[in-house]
Image (spheres, rainbow, N blue to C red):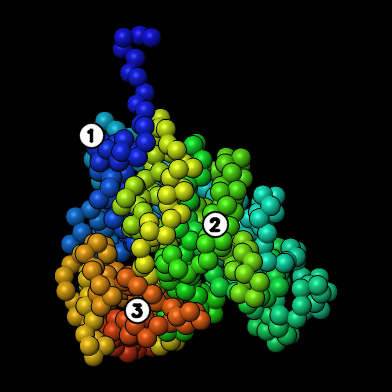
Amino acid sequence: MSKNTKKREKLHGISDIRRYFHRNETPTFFVSATSFNLMGIDEWVRNFRYINYIDCFDGHHPNVFSPPEVTHEPFTSIEDINNYLLQHKAVVDLIEGSKKGGKRPRSVFLFFDEKTEEIAKELDLEICFPPASLRAKVDNKISATRLGDEAGIASVPNVLGRVKDYNELRKVASKLGNDLVIQTAFGDSGHTTFFISNEADFDRHSKDIIEAPELKIMKRIRCRGAALEACVTRQGTIVGPLMTELVGFKELTPYKGGWCGNEVLPESFPAAVRKKARQMTAAFGESLRKLGYRGYFELDFLRDLDTNTLYLGEVNPRITGASAMTNLAAFAHADAPLFLFHLLEFSDVDFELDVEELNERWSQPEYIDGWGQLVIKHVTDQVGLITKAPPSGVWRMRPDGGADFVRVQTHRRTVESEDEAFFLRISKVGDYFYEGADLGILITPGRLMTDDFQLTDRARKWTQAIRSQYEWSPIGKEQAAVATRVAEAGNFKLL
């Protein structure tokens, strides 16, 4: 070996990994609409910054950069937002300035597409994710079902195919019963999942169903959703905790079947169910590795309440709306956030890690602390202009059910009891109220659902307390027309 050849660094275990990121010299940017999904990661990774369209902290977060808005085409996706950000002169200047240390900057996204990849290449900005084409293949609900079947992971009884009318639907789904759930290949569950029991139900969604190239037609079961995040690494698949999902609560979302929060509680699932979910996730991770996929992903599960059977719901090949819950949990503070292993997989460094030992430790109930999050949307069809909005930070609930702002904070770190919560504001003064608009996310210790999967009184009080902090004014016809266009263009999956 030449004397001038630098020996490649190798990390041995968790302590080395933690030290490596605390001394990180590579500029790392999370480019997205908000900082929500990776809150707190900047405290683990030196030189980690957020480039966001929405500044949820009004300039108070030291590592959030939100450029001044310039004229742009209406956004129809987060990909559009990210592409706008990467072409913004202020962002380009920030990225170019980060190169002065001699390290090629890297980026992570919630969503990105081929255009994002082209822009990043022009900026000499590394994307720390598999290619968009591979992510799209995995994200497809139809191909994910087939991938699960190949891995021996069962989905709810289903048929895959196309239908041209209601009669054909009944013919192809004759073995699935009268009550069906139909999903298209892509999209948010609140918009692309259809519950069909009769022809009238079909007619309401016929355009989306008939035009879809392929459908997943499932037997409707009495179930509850669960989610589990994991990371495919060269040493194996690292698996986080199983979380319950809050779905379709009218107090939080206008969409039946729409995701509106999570709980991380060790008592939410029997030990056998938790073990089964972890085994299924590890097996799916191995299938992803064989495809060439590596890094962060999430599996959604459907737990049949009548048989306790756990079915594969869908796969999200990315960080998700549950990532803040995973990466801020007790086990993450004891070892390292799951997302650090994703960055490690894309870093120019070798590492040794006993994945089996780590997964066994993370499966223990004592490593899981009880937290929940509520994703609060505007739930009515009223359209207006927001004139007052609550700041992000720690809030405290009063005995009368109201809430008071306590202090600025960047995540849930200093929340100490169930009468406190961290609120991340999304919609601000000057934004429009429209059906489905994200108002913000509230994170608090303790349970948010009862044993029979209803919102707790405390969850309802917190939701109402936050809603009461918003004020809005009616708008004229011209503004209403603008607001409607904003709603139609911007009512996509933001988180």
80 left or right of 406?
right
Residue denoted by label 2 = 275
In the rendered image of this protein, does residue 341 appear above or below residue 212?
A: above
Kindly check if marks 2 and 1 are in contact, taking CB atoms under 8 A apart as contact: no
Q: Which mark is residue 100?
A: 1
Mark 3: amino acid: Tyr
Residue denoted by label 3 = 432
- Residue appearing at x 45%, y 68% in the figure: 267
| Gap between marks 2 and 1 measured at Cα | 48 Å
10 left or right of 99?
right
- Residue appearing at x 34%, y 26% in the figure: 9
Q: State which quarter of the image contains the C terminus.
A: bottom left
User: How far from the left and from the top, in percent, is residue 215?
Assistant: 70, 65
Kindly check if marks 3 and 1 are in contact, taking CB atoms under 8 A apart as contact: no
Badge 3 density bin: few <14, some 14–19, many ≥20, Cα 10 Å: many
Residue at disc 1, secondary structure? helix
Name which of mark 2 and mark 1 comes first in the sequence.
1
Q: State which quarter of the image contains the N terminus.
A: top left
